[in-house]
Structures are given as C-alpha cells and as structure tokens.
Image (cartoon, rainbow, N blue to C red):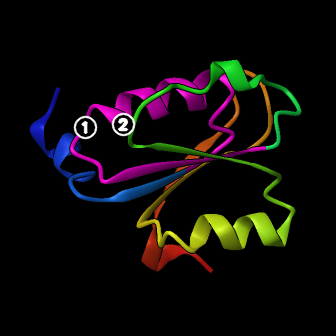
Amino acid sequence: MNKEIFEVFDGKTVLVTGGAGAIGSCLSKTLAYFKTKKIIILDDLSSSYEWNIPIHQKIEFIKGSILDQEKLDLAFSEKPEIVKSEKGMGLGKRITVSKKEGLT
C-alpha cells in the first residue's frame, strides 16, 4: 500500500459515522492501527450492533444519530480533522471522506 495513504491520518482525529456497520467498523479497526490520534464512531445502531464496534484504546463510541445535534456537537467537540460518512445502507452506496476545511 502507498505510504502517503497512511501519512494522511498521522496524528489526526477521525470521525466515522456509521462506524458500527460492516464497512465503518472495518475502516475504524484499520484506522486504529495507523498513527491516528483518535477515532470517534457515531452510530445510532439502527442497522448494526454495538458488539460490531472494534475495541481499541484509540476508539471512542458515541451512540446517537447524525440527526441529533447534541450528539453531533459531542462528536465535533473532539475537533476531528477527517470525517468519513456513509450515505445510505447496503452495497454500492457512496462513501465520502472530507477534510475539516471542506465541511459546511
């Protein structure tokens, strides 16, 4: 794998919405072994289970919806620099990764 891909995450806090799902949990587990500072998982468990969340000292789980402003404020209080958001459920859906500057 290209070294530059790993370096993007060095020292960064990453927010993964839908992090208890199949794709989000695998991504979170992988990111935990990069040189990330912290991985925050925000998931309402509507289509997944808490047991699917990887256990790692860098991973913090917040149970809640992206539609819940209080939970979003809590997740963003950690000032994530990279946000992974899964749009919709199931295979073939888009995954976007945004840097903090690109968020509106």
- Counting from the top left corner in percent of width and height, residue 10 is at 21, 53
Q: Residue at x 70, y 33 (%)?
A: 93
Q: Residue at x 86, y 64 (%)?
A: 68
Instruction: Judge by depth and name the residue closer to the eye, 90 or 12.
Output: 12
CA separation in Å, label 1 and label 2: 5 Å
For the N terminus, give its image quadrant. Answer: top left
- Check disc 2 and report the residue beneath it: 31
For the C terminus, the quadrant is bottom right
| Residue 17 coordinates in the image, percent (x, y) | 65, 47
Report the front residue among 95 and 31.
31
| Badge number at residue 34 | 1
Name above or below for residue 101 compared with residue 58: below
Looking at this rendering, what residue extends furthest in the front direction? 57
Q: Which residues are magenta?
A: 16-43
Asked if the residue under mark 2 is in contact with the one under mark 1, i.e. CB atoms within 8 Å, the reply is: yes
11 in the magenta segment: no
Where is residue 58? Give x, y as percent: 39, 43
